[in-house]
Amino acid sequence: MKTLYIHGLDSSPKPDKMAVIRKHGPAEGLHLDYRADNTAFYRLDEYINTHCITHIVGSSMGGFLGFWLAEKHQLPCLLFNPALAERSVSMEYQQQLNGCPRRLVVLGAKDDVVNPQQTTEFLTDLDTTATHQRVVWCNNLAHQIDTNTFTEFVNYFFNQQ
C-alpha cells in the first residue's frame, strides 16, 4: 500500500499531515504550483503509474485532482473540501468515470472557499453505482483542515478497508 497526498492551492505537503498518513503505510506528497503549472494532473498521473500508488488523499484543489485521478486509476480516495464544482485556477485534466472503488468526502459546512453545497450537488449528479461513496458534513469545519479532523478521517478511511 502506498498513498499519494495531493495538497491544496498555494499550499504544500505539510509534515504533520504526511506523518498522519504514514502511520498507515508509505506516503508521498509532491509540491505542486498549480498557478504556474496547469498540467499537474498529468504529472500526478505519471507519478501514480511509476510509483505503485494504491490510495489518494487530497485537499481542495488536490481533492479535485484526487477525484479525477482516483476515477482514472480506480483507486480509493479521501477528499477534504474538494474543488469539484468550481476552481479559482484552470487545470488540464481527463474527465472519465471508471469507477473509483471507495470515496470518502469530508466537507466543511463553514467553508467559504469551496462551496460545500455545490460540491454535494456535483457528487449527487454522478453515476456512482461502481463506487462506495460517503459524504460527511462537518458543521464546525471551514476550508482549512485542522490536524485533529485530518487525523480522525485519515484513520477512519484506512481502518475501513
Image (cartoon, rainbow, N blue to C red):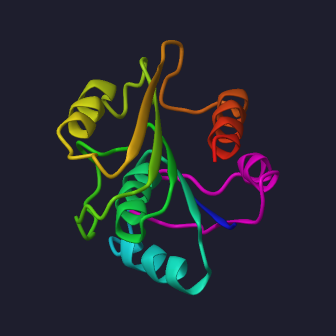
Residue at 63% x, 34% y is 153
120 horizontally vs 63: left or right: left
Give how far across and how far down residue 135 sits, in percent. Answer: 42, 30
The reply, left or right, for residue 156 in relation to residue 85 is: right
Which residue appears at 76% of the width and 65% of the height?
A: 26
Provide the residue span drawn in magenta: 6-34
Nearest to the observer: residue 131 or residue 6: 131
The x and y percentages for residue 117 are 27, 24
Residue 112 falls in image quadrant: top left
Report x, y in % for residue 61.
41, 51
Q: Quadrant of the N terminus?
A: bottom right
Q: Where does residue 137 sit, x and y in percent of width and height? A: 45, 21
User: Is 144 drawn above or below residue 75 in the view shown?
Assistant: above
* Residue at image point 43% right, 77% down: 45
Give the quarter of the image for residue 123: top left
Q: State the count of labels.
A: 0
Q: Is residue 67 visible?
A: yes
Task: Please indicate whether residue 56 sits to the left or right of residue 149 in the image.
Answer: left
Q: Can residue 6 be seen?
A: no
- For image coordinates 23% across by 34% down, the residue present is 124
User: As displayed, is residue 21 above or below residue 154?
Assistant: below
Outermost residue toward the left in this view = 125
**What residue occupies the far top of the structure in this picture?**
139
